């Protein structure tokens, strides 16, 4: 029976409305409890900042595209090297770290949970093999459905019961947590070297539109009572003028009632989808229009997809956008066709502050977070490693907290950026409470894992706790941003499930985390129709046998299964 008492903690726990109160936190057997006995291990926080363990709702941490990134970028593996110790394996890589560094580095920053944002069902076994090797953090994954033949056939035939049966089967087959939609329909069109140009552009050979795909999956998602909403990567990503498609995509779900206390639509890395103008020459920020929509509507949430200058390895199921990137930048490019399900592409690139395009992208991410009034609506992400590696979160946090820190960065950025963006005129500076929302509480709420004990410090929650070497009442984050960033980079203590896993930024224990997935019961004849169709597709098209396809229990050693029912 392990017990711990954290004394004199300055706690920010937004899910429970705790805003900088000086208090003690008691832990028993990996959970937060009311009080501890005299034999508990005592940690004196000495008034320092205490947050729930960080949660990352959108990151690319495992699976074939991460591995392709590693193969394409041998030079990356020489960055961030750290030799093995008695406790830890060697760290390699910066934009595409090895599996060990992936877990260690999250833990060093006080993060204890991260979700892989794109699992193709066909590649799910590999994804879980990697997830199982990432130490310390708890994980989950979002399963790709947006260009899937089974999905589009069911939608064309107006058969939502069959669609729900397939989504349930796909989540089971991939041991997935939620419904991810990437460039809906575009992945299939890319199989013919094409893309869909907008929400009403029919997918070749299927005669369904991106609008229908989003709408039907959103409806089915709520009828299935899934913990998370649909998670959408909009059409036309990376194209000037795409903000109009983004706003129109929001509207598709405006009247959908969420089945749980959460959004009914989450739109991801919106930085890449908030661009105005008609071409690269007149590209501008349209974050004001996006933030204005968020300020008027509470049914949706987004994440930033903040750009960080330097190296990134972009990886996405949006195949055509990677081809366009590679042509534009004369960069290396990989392309993958995931049979009946989706596509993928990987392109390594560099973000330069002297490129006004990259400057505008940098500004948009921050503008989205700062112009949207409700901090719960915009999660802090870099869409790791697309906008930049997650190890830069501490820097992004200080930029949200300090105008002076932003101005320091702006001094390096091409001047033209500031004619096309509003970042220079934004005075807002987020506080410790807002940052706790944007880096843990809102992520847990958006994913629907509060009930699983994530993102907060209430009694019964997982004892995932970050203590940072900073005293909020003695620190002015608007000017002491270097000190704040250093504290966020190396937590004084990271506690995972009641165990100290990092101390002053060094790993002290390497327990293995759990994996969340959802099992939905679909009890109607839609299931039979779906199975008939699925067997036919395996017989006629898939290169693997159906029996060799599904992720089996052996692949997920420490599962947390949530059961729901389709109504
Ligand atoms: Zn992503």
Image (tube, rainbow, N blue to C red):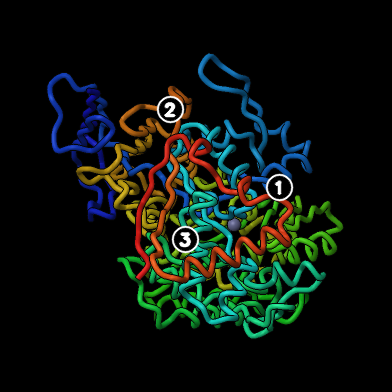
Q: Secondary structure at mark 2?
A: loop
- Out of 445 and 106, give the one closest to the viewer: 445
Q: Which residue is mark 1?
A: 311
Identify the residue position indicated by label 3 in the image: 168
Of residue 551 and residue 83, the one placed in the foreground of this image is 551
Looking at the image, residue 234 sits to the left or right of residue 325; the answer is left
Indicate the position of residue 10 as horizontal and vertical percent values.
26, 41
SS type, badge 1: strand
Q: Nearer the viewer, mark 3 or mark 2?
A: 3
Which sits in the foreground, 465 or 98? 98
SS at circle 3 = helix
Up the image or down, 237 lies above or below 278; here it is above
Q: Does residue 286 appear to the left or right of 39 in the view shown?
A: right
Do labels 3 and 2 touch, CB within 8 Å? no
Q: Name the N-terminal-most of marks 3 and 2.
A: 3
Crowding at mark 1 (Cα within 10 Å: few <14, some 14-19, many 20+): some
Q: Which residue is mark 2?
A: 511
Alpha carbon distance from label 2 to label 1: 31 Å
Label 2 crowd bin: few (<14), some (14–19), many (20+), radius 10 Å: some
Q: Position of residue 565 (x, y in %)?
A: 35, 63
Residue located at (35% from left, 44% from top):
475
Task: State which tag comes first along the sequence, 2 or 1.
Answer: 1
Within the displayed image, which quadrant is ligand 1 positioned in? bottom right
What residue lies at 65% left-to-right and 68% top-to-bottom? 149
Pick the quarter of the image with the N terminus. top left
Q: CA distance from mark 3 to mark 1?
A: 38 Å
Residue 486's x, y, as percent?
48, 38
């Amino acid at each position: 029976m392990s017990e711990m008492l954290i004394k004199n903690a300055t706690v920010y726990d937004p899910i429970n409305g705790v805003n900088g109160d000086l208090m003690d936190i008691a832990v028993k057997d990996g959970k937060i409890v009311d009080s501890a006995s005299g034999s508990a291990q005592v940690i004196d926080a000495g008034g320092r900042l205490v947050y729930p363990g960080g949660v990352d709702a959108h990151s690319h941490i495992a699976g074939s595209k991460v591995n392709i990134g590693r193969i394409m970028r041998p030079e990356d593996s020489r960055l961030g090297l750290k030799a093995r110790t008695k406790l830890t394996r060697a760290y390699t890589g910066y934009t595409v770290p090895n599996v060990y560094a992936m877990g260690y580095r999250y833990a060093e920053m006080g993060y204890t949970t991260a979700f892989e944002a794109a699992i193709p069902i066909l590649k799910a076994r590999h994804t879980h093999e990697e997830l199982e090797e990432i130490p310390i953090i708890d994980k989950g994954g979002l399963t790709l459905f947006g260009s899937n033949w089974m999905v589009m056939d069911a939608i064309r035939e107006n058969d939502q019961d069959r669609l729900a049966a397939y989504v349930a089967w796909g989540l089971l087959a991939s041991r997935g947590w939620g419904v991810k939609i990437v460039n809906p329909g575009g992945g299939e069109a890319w199989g013919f070297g094409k893309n869909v140009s907008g929400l009403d552009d029919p997918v070749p050979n299927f005669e369904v539109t991106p609008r229908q795909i989003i709408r039907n999956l959103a409806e089915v998602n709520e009828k299935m009572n899934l913990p998370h909403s649909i998670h959408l990567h909009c059409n036309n990503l990376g194209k000037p003028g795409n903000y109009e498609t983004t706003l129109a995509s929001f509207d598709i779900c405006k009247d959908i009632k969420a089945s749980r206390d959460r959004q009914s639509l989450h739109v991801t890395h919106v930085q890449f989808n908030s661009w105005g103008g008609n071409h690269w020459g007149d590209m501008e920020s349209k974050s004001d229009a996006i933030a204005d929509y968020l300020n008027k509507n509470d049914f949706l949430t987004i994440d930033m997809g903040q750009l960080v200058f330097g190296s990134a390895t972009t990886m996405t199921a949006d195949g055509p956008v990677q081809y366009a990137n590679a042509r534009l930048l004369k960069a290396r490019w990989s392309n993958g066709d995931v049979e009946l399900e989706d596509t993928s592409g990987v392109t390594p690139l560099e973000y330069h502050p002297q490129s006004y395009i990259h400057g505008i992208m940098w500004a948009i991410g921050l503008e989205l977070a700062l112009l949207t009034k409700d901090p719960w609506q915009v999660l802090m992400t870099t869409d790791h490693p697309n906008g930049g590696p997650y190890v830069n979160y501490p820097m992004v946090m200080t930029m949200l907290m300090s105008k002076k820190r932003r101005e320091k960065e702006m001094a390096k950025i091409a001047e033209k950026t500031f004619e096309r963006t509003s970042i220079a005129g934004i005075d807002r500076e987020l506080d410790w409470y807002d940052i706790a929302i944007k880096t843990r509480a809102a992520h847990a709420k958006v994913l629907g894992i509060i009930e699983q004990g994530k993102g907060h410090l209430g009694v019964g929650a997982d004892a995932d706790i970050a203590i940072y070497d900073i005293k909020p009442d003695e620190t002015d984050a608007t000017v002491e941003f270097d000190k704040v960033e250093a504290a966020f980079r190396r937590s004084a203590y990271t506690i995972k499930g009641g165990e100290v896993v990092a101390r002053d930024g060094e790993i002290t224990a390497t327990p293995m985390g759990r994996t969340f997935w959802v099992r939905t019961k679909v009890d109607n004849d839609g299931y039979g129709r779906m199975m008939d169709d699925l067997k036919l597709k395996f017989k006629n098209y898939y290169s693997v046998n159906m029996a060799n396809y599904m992720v089996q229990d052996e692949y997920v050693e420490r599962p947390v299964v949530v059961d729901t029912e389709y109504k």
